[in-house]
Amino acid sequence: MNQHKTKELKAVNVISNELLTDDVHYISVDKPFDFKAGQVIAVAMQPTDEPRLYSIASGISKKHLSILFDVKPEGELTPPLSVVKPGDTIYISEPFGKFLCLDSPATWIATGTGIAPFISLVESKQANNVNLLHGARTLDKFFFQDYLEEQLGNNYQRFCTTEASEKTTEGRLTSYLKNSENLPTNNKYYLCGSSQMVIDVREILIAKGVAFDNIIAEIYF
Amino acid sequence: MSKEALYGKTLSELKACVKDLGLPAFTSKQIADWLYKKHVTTIDDMTNLSKKARIQLNEKYEVGLMPPQSFQESVDGTKKYLYQTNNNQFIEAAYLPEENRNTLCISSQVGCKMGCLFCMTARQGFQKNLTSNEILNQIASLPERDTLTNVVYMGMGEPMDNIENVLKSLEIITAEWGYAWSPRRINVSTIGVIPAMRRFIEESEAHLAISLHSPFNEERKQLMPIENVYTAEKLVEALHDYDFGRQRRISFEYIMFKGVNDSAQHVKGLLQLLNGIKCRINLIHFHPIPNSPLEGSDYKTMEFFRDKLSQKGITTTIRKSRGEDIYAACGLLSTKKLLKENSDTDY
């Protein structure tokens, strides 16, 4: 496959469009391709539009393929994508990418909608011997937290920067990492989120003795 | 800047502006001439426009050039200029004088989203895409502007992540109504954002420089997160779709890290990966950044690497380091210290 030339985008039916919080949607579409957990697809409203990339946020055995995204009011794709209805058509590429998180033991670190590939991995039953750390600004941004808690138990930790609850740790994920005295240095670390998060977390991990080749990051751009 | 900048608009955009103001269509060509050939700094300097036209233009527009805020000069003659953007952020551009050519290395974004492990710009995260005005202002407001022979888009940011504005600026530099430079005087770098790179190849004729740094997927992922999405293998596969002709150059940039990507295995990996691509490889000495886990390969290793690749038919050179003492060298540009701290993060 040559990376998503427009002619390679495929029309798919929208199955559902779920509003998870005020600006985050979880959209499911027909699944025309098999994929590997952790991969991305290119998404566009029209076959001639410039597509954007999204991590697949559903398991490999699920009937439908889903993505998780927040609406960027200035963006060209997410405002129209946020109002699609079941039966509408959108365009997606074949899945691609290599953020497959195959190694364990591993620590998975996500912020905001960066949780998407990890949801796919957990739903695909590929989350053995992993710790998942998720940072978010508000409590409603821990997407699929009940499911992740059920699947991962204590290996799922939430860090909330502005609100408190008994299930979350108050404060920044980066502060937790900085203050941790027993970070496993031989684990693989898989990071997904904004580039700034990736940079900051990677610096902390390296300062804590984690070798750079044990840190693999997926960035949003 | 409260008024809209004219500098950075393409001829078709200038035509739309003059049409909007009810001015004669030929005015757009005159404006382009004043902007891109004579580099005037005020609309009042456009003396072949009618007074009425200048008044009308002044109401809504300004030329929009901003001189650099400051500069530093290296012992090797390299100068690093600091420019302010229209929203009061900062970018850097490096002027590299040599005996037979004077090159300006310009930025395309404030910061960068790509998160490469070895790059100083990556450490400041991403703040914004530069407009074509802000990209071209680095050239137009450079004190040495008239001595420039080459421009490289290798400063802060990933040019393919701001492809619209980069293409617009390239159009202005190369068009007859613009600077009328040959595209062969321009080199645009990318880490391999494939869809935008395709657009660049199709819509511009400038040279292309691809930051590779490893031929191996797992290793490149550790150095450059982009490899998780657009692998080097797919990148090279995409290049095979195009005929670059004899004049247009593709080069691969390869920073050499001690004990990481400088072995004979890597030579073999590069030869396999680049098989069939007419290209050259530039080996770059790693300029260490603070707290980096990486070290640069020594020059003996770099020479060995260069010779092995050259023997196999790939023109390979070791790029001379410039401006390292003022943090103007490859991978060192950053305006992080000038950023306002953002406390509103989700981590």
Image (cartoon, rainbow, N blue to C red):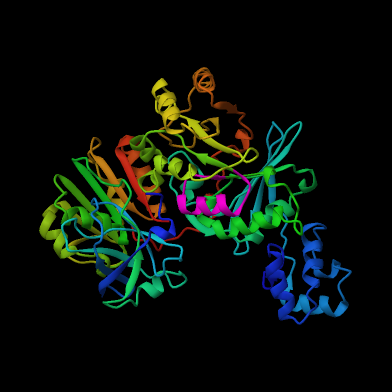
In the displayed image of the protein, which residue is found farthest to the bottom?
B22
Residue beneath the point at 34% across and 69% down = A90
Query: Along the horizontal axis of the image, is B282 left or right of A209?
Result: right
Q: Position of residue A181 (x, y in %)?
A: 24, 41
- To which quarter of the image does residue B33 belong? bottom right
Q: What quarter of the picture does the C terminus of chain B occupy?
A: bottom left
Residue beneath the point at 29% across and 54% down = A110
Residue beneath the point at 35% across and 38% down = A206
Can residue B296 be seen at all in this image of the molecule? yes
Q: Which residues are magenta?
A: B189-207
**Residue B206 shown in magenta:** yes
Q: Position of residue A124 (x, y in %)?
A: 16, 54
**Residue B244 shown in magenta:** no
Q: Position of residue B208 (x, y in %)?
A: 57, 43
Can residue B111 be seen at all in this image of the molecule? no
Quick one: A105 or A91, which is closer to the camera? A91
